[in-house]
Amino acid sequence: MSNPLLEPIHGVSLYDYAAVSAKMANGVDVKEICKKLGIEHAVFEEASALWVARMQEDSSFALTMAFGEYFGQAENHPKLKDLQAQVSDEEKANLDKMRDDRYFYEELNGARQAAYEYGYDGAQWIQENYGISLGDFQTVAMKWMEVQNQEMAGGQTGNIHHFIDYQQKKQAEYAKRFAEEQGGNLADDVEF
């Protein structure tokens, strides 16, 4: 660790902080997380504020990039990997499908974007309709981003464009659905 900004704060490493953030985003109680880490909640709160400050002062963005990587690896954290929020079998099936089925992931990504465009909280809409938390969604998104980066490095740009087109198609379908739920778009009855 040659970068002093990566030194733990009150015994909380950046990996710990990112894993805690991921677990909290997935609905795990922060007090339960702190108990597993063996720290007081107040200690974590201060460490959290200081990690945010460090990331803001890091002009190289090394901390932010490492945070994102660690966030995506939260399920591997030695002390926190067994902590899970309670989910139904259907919610678990949706999450597993999103992890394994790129088409399903791209569909939900398009749905989330369309929801935001129509004034909904896209992450909340996914949570309510599929039971997939923002943290789980972001973890899966990191996985598919790695796949896409590998495809890019391997010159498989056709595959990348295929999934971009699919996501945009699904986004348009969900946009139409959201527009209908809201009584249509303002210019739907205008003909040229």
Image (cartoon, rainbow, N blue to C red):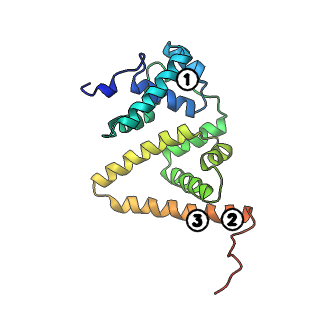
Q: Earlier in the sequence, mark 2 or mark 3?
A: 3
Coordinates of residue 14 in the picture (x, y in percent): 40, 27
Q: Nearer the viewer, residue 137 or 57?
A: 57
Three-letter amino acid code at the position of disc 1: Leu
Image disc number at residue 172: 3
User: Is residue 132 toward the left or the right of residue 8 in the image?
Assistant: right
Residue 146 to residue 32: above or below: below
Residue 159 to residue 11: above or below: below
For label 3, the SS is: helix
Query: Residue 61's image quarter?
Result: top left
Seen as rendered, the residue at the extreme right is: 183
Residue named by callout 2: 179
Three-letter amino acid code at the position of disc 3: Ala
Coordinates of residue 34 in the picture (x, y in percent): 54, 18
User: Is residue 164 toward the left or the right of residue 42 in the image?
Assistant: left
10 Å crowding of disc 2: few (<14), some (14-19), many (20+): some
